[in-house]
Amino acid sequence: MDLLDRARGRVGDDTVDDESREGVALFVDGPNVLREEFDVDLDDVREAAETAGPLVATRLYVDEHATPGLIQAAEARGYEVVVTSGDVDVKLAVDAAQFVVDGPAATLAVASRDTDFKPVVELANAYGLRTLVIAPGSHGRSDALRNAATDSVTLEE
């Protein structure tokens, strides 16, 4: 079953009712956002997402090389940390797409500077969700990702 066809109402009717959707689902691309060159604070990412509404999901995606200190700090700030041995981008995109289809959020927020997330932002738009892209800084920011989203925020460098 094609997700875009479901979004367009062509297949199935098992999606979450628009009236029951509330809040923001935040998905953070750890390897792309938490780089020394950006000096991003996870609290700033959370605050940027909260401008769109209360958070209903807050996930940080990291690879197996993430330090225990980073994982502990993220969990202390209320993030659900997802550690993957594979490609972080793929896991995040698949989870975000599943959340778009089945989740309760009215807004999908993606913190990244990676164009790879443009399809999931477009999917969320097709499902009628508001989309927010949070860039860690203007250096290397994806204009394509920013332009695909309903709203965008660039964190101060």
Image (tube, rainbow, N blue to C red):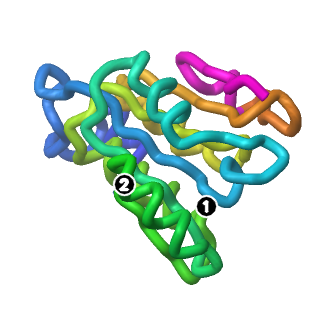
Q: Position of residue 30 (x, y in %)?
A: 60, 56
Depth check, front residue: 39 or 122: 39
**Range shown magenta:** 145-157
Q: In which image quadrant can residue 25 be found?
A: top left
Image side of residue 1 versus residue 104, left or right: right
- Residue labelled with disc 1: 89
Residue type of the residue flagged with mark 1 = Asp
Q: Position of residue 106 (x, y in %)?
A: 29, 26
SS class, disc 2: helix
Residue sitting at the far right: 139
State the separation of the CA atoms marked 1 and 2. 23 Å
Question: Disc 1 or 2, which lies upstream in sequence?
Answer: 2
Depth check, front residue: 121 or 138: 138
Q: Is residue 83 above or below residue 107?
A: below
- Residue labelled with disc 2: 76
Q: Quadrant of the N terminus?
A: bottom left
